[in-house]
Amino acid sequence: MPECYRESIDEKTQIAVWNISEPEEELEKGLSLSKQALKTLSQRKSTDHRKGYLAIKQLLKIFDVDPLAQKYDENGAPFLIDGRCLSISHTKDVAAVVIASTPVGIDLEHYQEKIKKIAPRFLHQNETDDAKKFSDTFYLTQIWTAKEALYKIFRKPGIQFKTQLRVAPFNPMDPEGIGLIFNNGETHFFSLHFRYFKDFCLSLATIKNDSL
C-alpha cells in the first residue's frame, strides 16, 4: 500500500504519509531523478534508507513538486526552491512529507520499548513529573517525535533536546499540543499536531500566532 494518509492542517499546510510496502524497483517507477538524486540514492547503503528516500520522492510527486525543485541546505535540511516550506521524515517502512507556506517540522517514529532506556537523555525535567507517563512507550514516543519536529522547524544546529526543548503536558490521544524552545534567553512557542497510528505516531510543528 503506498500513500496511506493525507490531511490538510489548514489551507496552506498539507501532510502525506506513505506506507512503504513495495520493493525498491517499484518505488523508483515514475520518478524523474536527477544525477545528484541518483548519486544520493546510491550513497544510501541500507535498503530501508533507499526505500525511504524514494518514498519521499513519491510523496513530493503527489504534491506536484518537480524533483529538481527540492534541495538540501548546508545543514542537510530539505527545502523547496519555490519558497514553500518543506519537512520530511522516514523510519523503517513509513515516510512523511509536509509542505506549507510557513516554517514546519514533521517527524514520525514506530513504537519501541527501547525508547524507555534513552528517555532520560531527551526528557526535560518538567516532562518527568508524572511517573506513569514516564514509563509509557506511547507517551515517550510522542514526546520524541514532537521534539524532532520542533528541532526541524527551528533549524538551529546544536539545540539540546533535554534542556532547550519542552513539550507542554498533554493527555493520551490529544490531537494538539504546545512546544517550547529555549534559546539565547528567549522562549519560542509552537503549535504541535499529534496523529496516532497503529504502529507509529506522528508530530507536526507549526508556527504559533504569537510565536517568534
Image: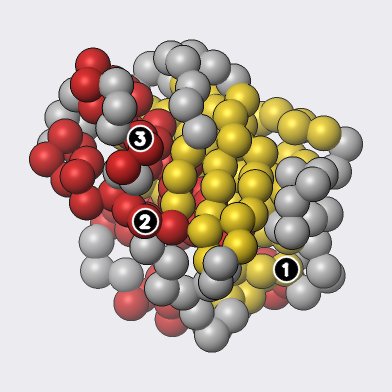
Disc 3 and disc 2: Cα gap in Å? 11 Å
Q: Amino acid at mark 2?
A: Thr
Tell me the residue at 65%/45% (across/down). 190
| Foreground of the two, 64 or 99 | 99
Which of the two discs, 1 and 3, sits closer to the camera? 3
Mark 2 = which residue? 163
**What sort of colour scheme is used for the picture?**
secondary structure
Disc 2 and disc 1: Cα gap in Å? 31 Å
Mark 3 = which residue? 127
| Foreground of the two, 101 or 127 | 127
Expressed as whole percent of the image width and height from the top left, the position of residue 211 reads 74, 51
Which of the two discs, 2 and 1, sits closer to the camera? 2
- Which is more N-terminal, label 1 or label 2? 1
In the image, is 15 to the left or to the right of 202? right
Q: Amino acid at mark 3?
A: Glu
In the image, is 73 to the left or to the right of 158? right
Label 2: state its secondary structure: helix
* Corner quadrant of residue 209: top right
Label 3: state its secondary structure: helix
Mark 1 = which residue? 80
197 above or below 117? above
Disc 1 and disc 3: Cα gap in Å? 34 Å
Label 1: state its secondary structure: strand
